[in-house]
Image: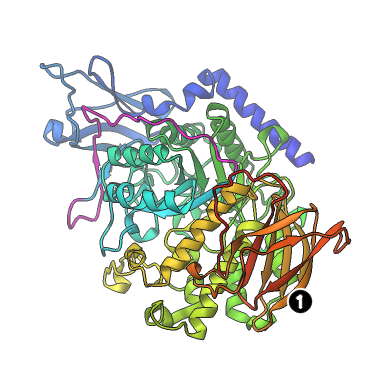
């Protein structure tokens, strides 16, 4: 592809210039050691900022009694400013840990602006205050990581998480709460990766973390930077990798506590309007062609990897970055003209290539995921091949398909072929993260899958001490089936938003004026799992055993599935992946008896996961001692087939394993789950 070849040439030029001007990207991406506030070995403090449009810069704060003029920065070349503060008489730093600061910017128009350093490592919002304050963070005893990073998982099972809502209490939960109460659940559930949202500091809680104000600061509303480090270190001790939801696609338009108009101009880190403004998000857009913006963003990635020891990133808003139109009003039919033309932002693509090249060179086990709905080719191919270098992209069409089906179609009208097409429609050789629902589908204004399936009955009929109503029965079974089908067929990784694994009974809505600043819906009710007679526990147990079964058989890391049946009349889907046979019957009223299914490997098959098992809220209609033997009878493009005596009516599925082959872990019991 000529476009990829030309793009790769621009990337090579960028690397060459980094080598020539900065001595290579290793030193360049450590610029957080020279910008912002940095303490030297002799306790001198060296401060550096980039403010090309400023007339003068001063530092003020607790350390000088908020004198606006006593500590001027010296102007350097290329729009940089520098200030050196010698230590006090007792040899301690001139600025004490946990004290407040401001950069005073004098503009060419004669304005005096009070700003937070773009490189600030901590910012707090005191009670009843709207604007965040910059706090100098340099603890005398910083947290030291004990546990090494786990190796990159072959099968990525992601637990998408938000620290602030990770508690049943109506308040902002803490990093420590997550470490103590949520990490053990994630480990028990069989997830090996956590994707942390809303960590980069954001002034507006209800923005879900997507209006970032301080890019180097871990959000103080959940606790201190040291407590976040402990969270990540503890996750590593459990062999769980942690990804940061990084927002480099745009920034908050806040000025007093954000990057916007830092030096008094309408650009600095961003393009000037209108190119530098996102029409729908109300935010500022970075100028990826700027040398200092490149320094800032690449160093930001390095900072989170080095200082906090994250294991990678989920890049937010990649579609918006890649196109000048930001994806607004574009349907993306798949025609190649949509991906290669003047509408593509080459500066942004080169930035993403550079970011992935730097990360994967410095950290070979680093994981990067692109949030891209456009389906641009080669997003998940290596930079050396002319791709953008991501490891995975989110399969964003899958949750949309499930919501569409539940909103628009009766059960008997579900189209098996269309479901399979959506789950398998991905570019070969480009890994996808499949999910039935993420945080997007849980937000107020939409409904989670559990809510679409069971609605208000979730509040009254989820007790296992009473008979299941038809609505609860259908909802519980389909909730599991949708997840297993998505897990096994939809991608090379799997994602679940916290709480959705057990059918969290309410949507998500952050405190805001529209709900009287209520925290009632800004929480996850894990307490429901501690009441054994509630059916939420049955859904939790299924999700756990689904993940544990994948961990044993590794279908996510296996080549794409071979689908041998997608029968519209029977509402049956049959496929093989990772030497496992999946059978799903979505028919609302009819069981399938003596049902012939195709298999590749001859031998004896037994049930390893069954959606109808009682412990998962099923009806226990299948005998797990049953053995299924293949016959050399070709069927549905396979050389072998076998008769399955019973696939119970709707919402039942089975996962069969060829026990003629050696089991990887014979201690794992046969599992049944309801789908």
Query: Which residue is at 55% across, 65% downward?
Result: 673
Q: Which residues are magenta?
A: 126-154
Foreground residue, 113 or 345? 345
In this image, 620 relative to 256: left or right?
right
Query: Which residue is at 37% across, 47% downward?
Result: 199
Location of the C terminus (image quadrant): bottom right
Q: Tell me residue 31's x, y (percent).
A: 42, 27
Magenta span: predominant SS is: loop
Q: Tell me residue 216's x, y (percent).
A: 37, 38
Would you identify the image quadrant in which residue 143 lies? Answer: top left
Q: Residues within 10 Å of mark 1 (few under 14, many from 20)?
A: some
Foreground residue, 16 or 672? 672
> Would residue 385 be visible to someone looking at this image?
yes
Magenta stretch containing residue 606, yes or no?
no
Q: Tell me residue 372's x, y (percent).
A: 60, 53
Q: Tell me residue 656's x, y (percent).
A: 67, 59
Q: Which residue is mark 1?
A: 568
């Amino acid at each position: 592809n000529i476009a990829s070849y030309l793009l790769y040439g621009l990337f090579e030029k960028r690397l060459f210039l980094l080598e020539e001007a900065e001595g290579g990207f290793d030193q360049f991406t450590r610029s957080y050691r020279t910008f912002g506030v940095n303490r030297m070995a002799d306790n001198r403090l060296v401060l550096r900022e980039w403010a090309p449009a400023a007339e003068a810069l001063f530092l003020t704060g607790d350390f000088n009694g908020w004198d606006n003029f006593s500590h001027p920065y010296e102007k350097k070349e290329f729009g940089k400013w520098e200030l050196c503060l010698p230590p006090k008489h007792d040899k301690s730093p001139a600025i004490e840990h946990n004290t407040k600061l401001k950069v005073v910017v004098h503009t060419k128009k004669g304005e005096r602006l009070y700003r937070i350093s773009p490189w600030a490592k901590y910012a707090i919002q005191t009670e009843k205050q709207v604007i965040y304050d910059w706090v100098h963070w340099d603890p005398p005893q910083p947290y030291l990581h004990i546990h090494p990073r786990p190796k990159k998982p072959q099968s990525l099972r992601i637990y998408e998480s938000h620290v602030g809502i990770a508690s049943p209490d109506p308040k902002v939960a803490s990093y420590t709460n997550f470490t103590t109460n949520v990490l053990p659940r994630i480990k028990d559930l069989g997830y090996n990766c956590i994707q942390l949202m809303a960590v980069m500091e954001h002034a507006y809680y209800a923005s879900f973390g997507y209006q970032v104000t301080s890019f180097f600061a871990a959000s103080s509303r959940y606790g201190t930077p040291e407590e976040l480090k402990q969270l990540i270190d503890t996750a590593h001790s459990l062999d769980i990798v942690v990804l940061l939801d990084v927002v480099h696609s745009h920034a908050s338009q806040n000025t007093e506590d954000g990057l916007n108009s830092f030096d008094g101009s309408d650009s600095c880190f961003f393009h000037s309007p209108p190119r530098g403004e996102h029409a729908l998000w109300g935010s500022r857009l970075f100028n990826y062609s700027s040398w200092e913006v490149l320094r800032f963003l690449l160093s930001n990635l390095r900072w989170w990897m080095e200082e906090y020891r994250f294991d990678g990133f989920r890049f937010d808003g990649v579609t918006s970055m890649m196109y000048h139109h930001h994806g607004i009003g574009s349907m993306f039919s798949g025609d190649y003209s949509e991906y290669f033309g003047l509408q593509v932002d080459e500066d942004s693509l080169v930035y993403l290539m550079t970011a992935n090249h730097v990360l994967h060179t410095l950290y070979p086990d680093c994981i990067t995921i692109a949030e891209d709905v456009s389906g641009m080719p080669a997003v998940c191919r290596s930079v050396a091949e002319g791709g953008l270098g991501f490891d995975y992209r989110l399969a964003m069409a899958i949750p949309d398909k499930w919501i569409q089906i539940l909103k628009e179609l009766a059960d008997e009208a579900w189209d098996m072929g269309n479901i399979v097409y959506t789950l398998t429609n991905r570019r070969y050789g480009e890994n996808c993260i499949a999910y039935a629902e993420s945080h997007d589908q849980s937000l107020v204004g939409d409904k989670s899958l559990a809510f679409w399936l069971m609605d208000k009955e979730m509040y009254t009929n989820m007790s296992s001490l009473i008979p299941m109503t038809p609505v609860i029965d259908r909802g519980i079974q389909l909730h599991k089936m949708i997840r297993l089908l998505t897990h096994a067929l939809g991608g090379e990784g799997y994602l679940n938003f916290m709480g959705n694994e057990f059918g969290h009974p309410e949507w998500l809505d952050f405190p805001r004026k529209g709900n009287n600043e209520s925290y009632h819906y800004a929480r996850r009710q894990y307490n429901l799992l501690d009441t054994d007679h509630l059916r939420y526990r049955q859904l939790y147990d299924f999700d756990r055993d689904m993940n544990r079964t994948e961990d044993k058989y590794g279908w996510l890391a296996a080549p794409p599935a071979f689908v041998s049946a997608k029968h519209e009349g029977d509402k049956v889907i049959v496929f093989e992946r990772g030497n496992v046979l999946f059978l799903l019957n979505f028919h609302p009223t009819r069981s399938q008896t003596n049902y012939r299914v195709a298999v590749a490997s001859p031998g004896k098959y037994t049930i390893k996961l069954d959606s109808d098992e009682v412990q998962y809220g099923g009806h226990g209609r299948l005998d797990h001692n049953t053995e299924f033997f293949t016959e050399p009878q070709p069927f549905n493009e396979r050389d072998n087939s076998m008769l399955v005596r019973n696939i119970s009516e709707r919402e039942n599925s089975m996962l069969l394993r060829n026990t003629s082959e050696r089991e990887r872990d014979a201690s794992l019991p046969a599992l049944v789950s309801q789908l």
